Amino acid sequence: MTAQYKLHRNVAVITLDNPPVNGLGFNTRRALVKGLERALANARVKAVVITGAGKAFSGGADIKEFGSPKAIQEPNLLSVIKALEHATKPVVAAMHSVVMGGGLELALGCHYRIAAPGCKVALPEVKLGLIPGAGGTQRLPRVLGVEVALNMIVSGEPQASELLASLPGQKLFDKMAASNESLLDEALELARSVADTRPLPLVRDLPCKHPLGDAYFQFARNMVGGMSKNYPAPLKCVDAIEAATKNRIDQGLAIEREIFTNLMFTPECKALRHLFVAERATSKIADVPADTPKRDVKSLAVIGAGTMGGGITMNFLNAGIPVKMLEMKQEALDRGIATIRKNYESQVARGKLKQDKYEQRMALLSTTLDYNDLKDADMVIEAVFEDMGVKETVFRKLDEVMKPGAILASNTSTLDMNKIASFTRRPQDVIGTHFFSPANVMRLLEVVRGEKTGKDVLATVMALGKKIRKTTVVSGVCDGFIGNRMIEQYSRQAGFLLDEGCTPAQVDKAVEKFGFAMGPFRMGDLAGNDIGWAIRKRRAVERADMQYSKTADKLCELGRFGQKTGAGWYDYKPGKRDAIPSDLVVKMIEDHRAEQGITPRKISDEEIVQRLVFSLVNEGAHILEDGIASKASDIDMVYITGYGFPIYRGGPMHYASEFGLFNVMQAMQRFARNPMDDAQFWTPAPLIQRLVAAGKTFS
Ligand SMILES: NC(=O)c1ccc[n+]([C@@H]2O[C@H](COP(=O)([O-])OP(=O)(O)OC[C@H]3O[C@@H](n4cnc5c(N)ncnc54)[C@H](O)[C@@H]3O)[C@@H](O)[C@H]2O)c1
């Protein structure tokens, strides 16, 4: 049963009951309409109350039906709302907790509305590249006024019910209940008090105007257009709301429907919907069911108070989990604590953190120089130097002191997690937690599952990732895991492009126009070009077959490591981060070409973008085939949350699927014929070849 029907004397109560948030899926809609028909047919029933069981009134569309025909199967939400408006007995929406999307649109179709305090009220469709499609753009302005409704619809952000109830002249709520507990009784009382009222009030009958008319919408378009450059939906929200002010409601509803349907097919909407599902899918691991038992992690130890150790620690303090940091020397601990304090103090200064919260968080932090002090921690994360010898010393020590059942994690970005686990007598308790820098800011957490990592350990760390508000993606063990293994191919292509005729600024500009937050060379300057240099030196021994442009090494030989040395691919003015194209670097590249006997050619932005993005795609396909990532959508989440891939393009694998894998494969074959490039790399991954042959995509 997805909606319960119960009589409370002369009032029928229909309770939506589709956990977790009473999504308005087909079965729920059908049960709701059946309940309504039953109430209308029963002469004893004088009024109807609709409410939600559990944690929500309704969170809107049922995500399990996303994109499936069931989402629009009759009775669809529009028909349900029509049935409510035509009801011959008063219908009261009794709202609590979550009132979002279709849930709010449903309530706007009822004759009366009562809300408990603390409801989160929103029309969040814009976040999926859509506008509300079941009357939200037409009815919300009628009850809250055009401006408030426009702000809510364009931002998609939830507002508290008590705030909305306090707005002068609002007609969203007829009454506020005292509490969640009293909501039903107060709703029944309201229903009985209006049982004989006729005609029944309808939101659709309310007027909808803005006193400034066109001038207001002109202003709104300027504001919204400036803030939503690559996303069509926000401006379309303005169009739909303007239509509400200029048309009779049925015409307005038809306009809303048309806009909604057209938006569904835009690449931006497809990308956003893909990512919405992808984000939720990251925690689904085929052989680790949701009910896998988890270990208790109530306290944490962090080894190393450097760049990463400090950032990692902050995540846990923020989540209320006590952390003990261990270092080799007191000075290192003092430096680490000072950096954490500085970070929090800047948040306090910017009004992002309250002073008392800051103090509470710092009170959860303690330090030590002695491993014996860590023995009671439920989990330890190691963030010491990236050196197998150092990791070995640390893990052997941890194996000695940590209590049985403690989880031993490493933040290594390149080293073999299986080998690290082998330094202990409990490899089942060892796992990789690869945070991204700055670790207290970046959303991505790659969880590295070793050969012997226990399922309960994996399940625990995935849940912990959620608790500290990370997007947590599982990766198998390989050099670079998912993200860095792919970025290496991308960087190699960026280097070849310099050899062949591009400048760093040209490559960066093309990629930034595509939508990346930063091109590869600006990124290198920010992260430090010496990191890649060290990796290439190691590679020269381990993988001599891997070719690189020599330009990056030459840059590092000049000491141009990036922003931290005041010069990299670009020049920097002291204390500034603006990248200024460097004549010296351009000359260095030209000299390099001359030495190699290369005649430069003009390279189009299209070629630049395709070589960079499709290099990610080809390596991503190998990663899938090798079982390092279990789904293409996980790779997309890694690139969106960790590498600044444009959100509205949905991640590299989604982008390739939309571009057409046949076209992607053709481009790869073209690049393979370029004698300056790596023909072997550009052989399309077997997975891509198979998908093209079968006419399929990554999804
Ligand atoms: N910096 C990044 O962008 C980044 C990103 C992801 C992962 N990582 C990984 O995180 C780890 C740490 O990197 P970082 O950038 O924080 O390095 P860092 O040099 O800033 O910090 C390392 C800290 O570890 C301490 N340390 C070294 N040996 C120790 C030992 N035996 N016992 C206790 N403390 C010891 C050092 O004193 C230093 O404070 C590395 O494995 C690195 O590959 C770094």
Image: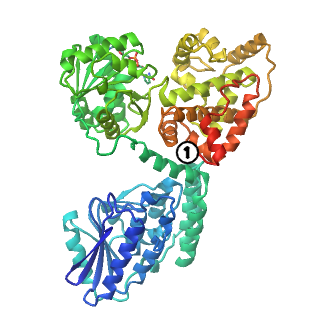
Query: In the shown orientation, is residue 558 left or right of residue 506?
Result: left
Q: Nearer the viewer, residue 565 or 378?
A: 378
Q: Nearer the viewer, residue 317 or 679?
A: 679
Residue at (43%, 20%) from the top-left corner?
Answer: 416
Quick check: 624 left or right of 190?
Answer: right
Report whether 274 appears left or right of 46: right
Ligand 1 occupies quarter: top left
Residue 206 image offset from top left, x and y in percent: 45, 78
Picture quadrant where residue 17 is located: bottom left
Residue beneath the point at 41% across and 71% down: 143
The residue singled out by tag 1 in the image is 650
Q: Amino acid at mark 1?
A: Gly
Q: Residues within 10 Å of mark 1 (few under 14, many from 20)?
A: many
- Residue placed at 29% from the left, 17% from the top? 424
Residue 308 occupies which quadrant of the picture? top left
User: Can residue 506 be seen here?
Assistant: yes
Residue 373's place in the image compared with 8, above or below, is: above
Mark 1 residue element: loop
Question: In the rendered image of this protein, does residue 384 appear above or below residue 619?
Answer: above
- Looking at the image, which is closer to me, 572 or 291? 291
Q: Could you say where residue 561 lies in the image, as x and y percent from the top left?
A: 56, 15
